[in-house]
């Protein structure tokens, strides 16, 4: 089983499941438009991005077949594999070394951040996983959050009120402190899947990811924050969520409608690390990859509840007609 994003990409290339774009493309609308054309089919690998040296992959787990492949499961067994991973989660091993230390900068403008839709507030990183330690309960949380660049070393961040990261941030803010964070882009899909799961308060999503990866996940400590991130990440950033600064943002969400404009907290980036020949991961909001990442952990939870309460239940599926969110059969 693969353990990083680029090896998973190589694996699906072998089955002709990757559409490689060699033509020069822009991060403004063009990458999103091509990804939209491929929705529900092949992953897209962009090798020639205008004004950027990074490669970019999108639609990585944009089908149930590739989603199952990412977690080492059959398509029919996705829910069972996720439920088992949650119940048998184990701590990953720690590694002192990581390839993302191969390069470093403080300038976030080197990232090929995609502008997806015309009326959004700006370009967005949509695959970013945030890592933070809750000083109230002394545990680390990992979750997916959209980021909008503001200049060369700041992002706005959308946090849903009351969820783990927001709760952790508010504890720090109420104690007069900024919140130290780490960010990854370009991790193995199993890590992204685990971090999309709304785990119970105090549960470490990286332990679920480790279980999905058959206990092969390793973590490396970030030098400045001490936070643990996947050793095989393509891109890692360290910084802090500022307690006293906000920036208005909005974007298209999973129902393909625009979110309401609202002030969002701001992240100050202090260091950006990346692997040699880095591959950036973009997720097109409102389309199949984004919907599956949001829906499958919920679908797995629904299956567990329904089969326990009603043993005759065969399978619960969140339908594509309901945006993999609003309708289950």
Image: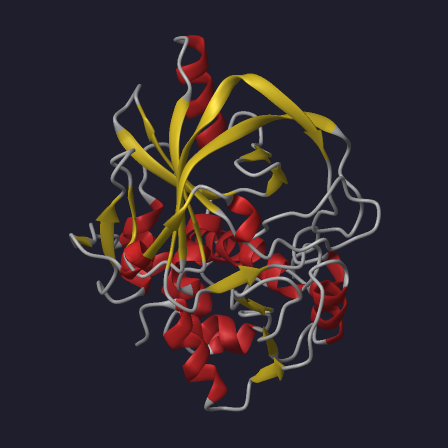
- Which residue shows up at 49% across the image and 86% down it? 13
Q: Measured from the top left, where is residue 42 in percent x and y?
A: 62, 80
Q: Quadrant of residue 106?
A: top left
Work out whether 128 lies above or below 80.
above
Using residue 129 as the reference point, say whether residue 111 is left or right of it: right
Using residue 240 as the reference point, say whether residue 47 is left or right of it: right
Can the viewer see residue 199?
A: no
Q: Quadrant for the C terminus, please.
A: bottom right
Q: Nearer the viewer, residue 266 or 306?
A: 266
Q: Measured from the top left, where is residue 25 in percent x and y?
A: 70, 70
Using residue 279 as the reference point, say whether residue 255 is left or right of it: right
Work out whether 159 lies above or below 143.
above
Q: Quadrant for the N terminus, please.
A: bottom left
Q: Nearer the viewer, residue 6 or 142?
A: 6
Which residue occupies the extreme bottom position in the image? 15
Q: Quadrant of residue 26?
A: bottom right
- Which residue shows up at 69% across the image and 80% down it? 23
Can the viewer see residue 319?
A: yes
- Which residue shows up at 50% across the image and 70% down it? 67
Q: Measured from the top left, where is residue 48 in percent x and y?
A: 61, 74
């Amino acid at each position: 089983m693969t353990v990083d994003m680029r090896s998973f990409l190589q694996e699906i290339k072998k089955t002709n499941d990757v559409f490689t774009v060699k033509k020069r493309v822009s991060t403004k609308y063009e990458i999103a438009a091509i990804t939209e054309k491929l929705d529900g089919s092949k992953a897209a690998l962009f090798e020639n991005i205008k004004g950027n040296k990074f490669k970019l992959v999108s639609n990585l787990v944009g089908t149930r077949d590739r989603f199952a492949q990412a977690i080492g499961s059959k398509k029919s067994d996705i829910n069972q594999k996720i439920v088992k991973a949650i119940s048998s989660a184990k701590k990953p091993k720690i590694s002192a070394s990581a390839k993302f230390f191969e390069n470093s900068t403080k300038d976030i403008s080197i990232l090929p951040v995609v502008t997806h839709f015309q009326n959004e507030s700006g370009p967005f990183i949509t695959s970013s996983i945030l890592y933070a330690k809750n000083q109230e309960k002394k545990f680390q949380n990992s979750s997916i959050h959209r980021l909008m660049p503001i200049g060369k070393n700041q992002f706005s961040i959308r946090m849903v009120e009351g969820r783990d990261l927001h709760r952790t941030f508010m504890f720090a803010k109420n104690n007069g402190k900024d919140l130290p964070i780490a960010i990854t882009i370009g991790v193995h899909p199993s890590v992204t899947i685990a971090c999309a799961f709304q785990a119970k308060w105090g549960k470490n999503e990286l332990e679920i990811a480790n279980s999905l990866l058959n206990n092969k996940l390793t973590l490396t400590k970030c030098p400045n924050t001490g936070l643990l991130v996947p050793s095989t990440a393509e891109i890692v950033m360290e910084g802090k969520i500022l307690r006293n600064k906000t920036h208005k943002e909005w974007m298209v969400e999973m129902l393909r409608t625009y979110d309401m404009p609202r002030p969002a907290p701001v992240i100050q980036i202090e260091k950006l690390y990346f692997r040699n020949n880095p591959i950036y991961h973009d997720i097109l909001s409102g389309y199949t990859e984004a919907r599956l990442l949001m829906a499958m952990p919920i679908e797995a939870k629904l299956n567990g509840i329904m089969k326990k309460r009603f043993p005759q239940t065969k399978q619960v599926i969140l339908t594509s007609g309901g945006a993999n969110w609003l309708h289950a059969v």
